Image (spheres, grey):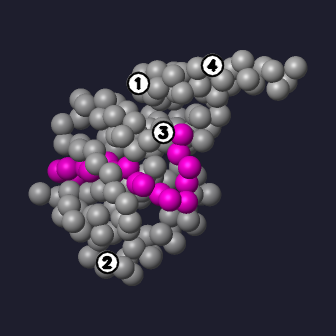
Amino acid sequence: MRRVIYPGTFDPVTNGHIDVIERATELFDEVVVTVAKNPSKSPLFSVSERIEMLEVSLKDIPNVFVDSFGGLVVDHAKEIGAVGIIRGLRAISDFEFEFQMALMNRRLNDSLKTIFLMPNEKYTYLNSTIIRNLAQFDGNIQDFVPPIVVEKLREKYAGRQDKFQEVGE
């Protein structure tokens, strides 16, 4: 059984994330998508909301499981018996940070491998921050995220549109 971990903030999950997850399922027996509790970030969604969005979005992929962790990803990977860490690379700008993280993770646990996967080119410009910004101003995000994410973002930003309009007036 070859299990890998795909850690991320997923605030919110995008179709680019899902594309990477689908690619990982073709290579490994199990993919554990794990929501990071990162104290240096201020996410829009709670951990439980992000887990819910992931579970609903990934329900039709049989060898994917969702969980969360706080602390070092290498420790969590060891706890769940993962042989590797999946990381998505959208553009060359992602590489430097991801390369440094991969080297540090190797230093912390040299038996754990980092596997870089590229999403479909139609998702290379996509990230959660862009999605939140579009949704905040009522932009159309339906082509970029699963339906549950559209719904949850609408709920989060409901009533805020009036505040934005007042500021601009």
Judge depth for marks 4 and 3 and give the one in front.
4
In three-dimensional space, the C-alpha distance between marks 4 and 1, rounded to whole angstroms, equals 19 Å
Q: Is residue 5 visible?
A: yes
Q: Is residue 47 magenta?
A: no
Q: Give, as a single range, the part of the protein colored magenta.
A: 26-44
Query: What amino acid type is highlighted by mark number 3?
Result: Phe
- Quadrant where the N terminus sits is bottom left
Residue 144, how many percent across, how many down? Answer: 51, 29
Q: Quadrant of residue 74?
A: bottom left
In three-dimensional space, the C-alpha distance between marks 1 and 3, rounded to whole angstroms, equals 13 Å
Q: Is residue 5 left or right of residue 158?
A: left
Query: Compared to 168, does 65 lie above or below?
Result: below
Q: Which residue is mark 2?
A: 109
Cβ atoms under marks 4 and 1 closer than 8 Å? no
Residue 125, how many percent across, how many down? Answer: 60, 41
User: Which residue is outermost to the left?
Assistant: 1
Kind of element beneath mark 2: loop
Considering only order in the chain, which callout, 3 or 4, is on the residue closer to the N terminus? 3
Q: Which residue is mark 1?
A: 148
Residue 142, how many percent across, how many down? Answer: 51, 21
In three-dimensional space, the C-alpha distance between marks 4 and 2, rounded to whole angstroms, equals 47 Å
Residue at 64%, 28% (x, y): give it.
136
Query: Compared to 66, does 140 lie above or below?
Result: above
Q: Residues within 10 Å of mark 3 (few under 14, many from 20)?
A: some
Considering only order in the chain, which callout, 2 or 3, is on the residue closer to the N terminus? 3
Considering only order in the chain, which callout, 1 or 2, is on the residue closer to the N terminus? 2
Q: Is residue 65 left or right of residue 141?
A: left
Q: Which residue is mark 3?
A: 45
Considering only order in the chain, which callout, 3 or 1, is on the residue closer to the N terminus? 3
Judge depth for marks 4 and 2 and give the one in front.
4
Q: Is residue 23 visible?
A: no
Residue at 28%, 48% (x, y): give it.
67
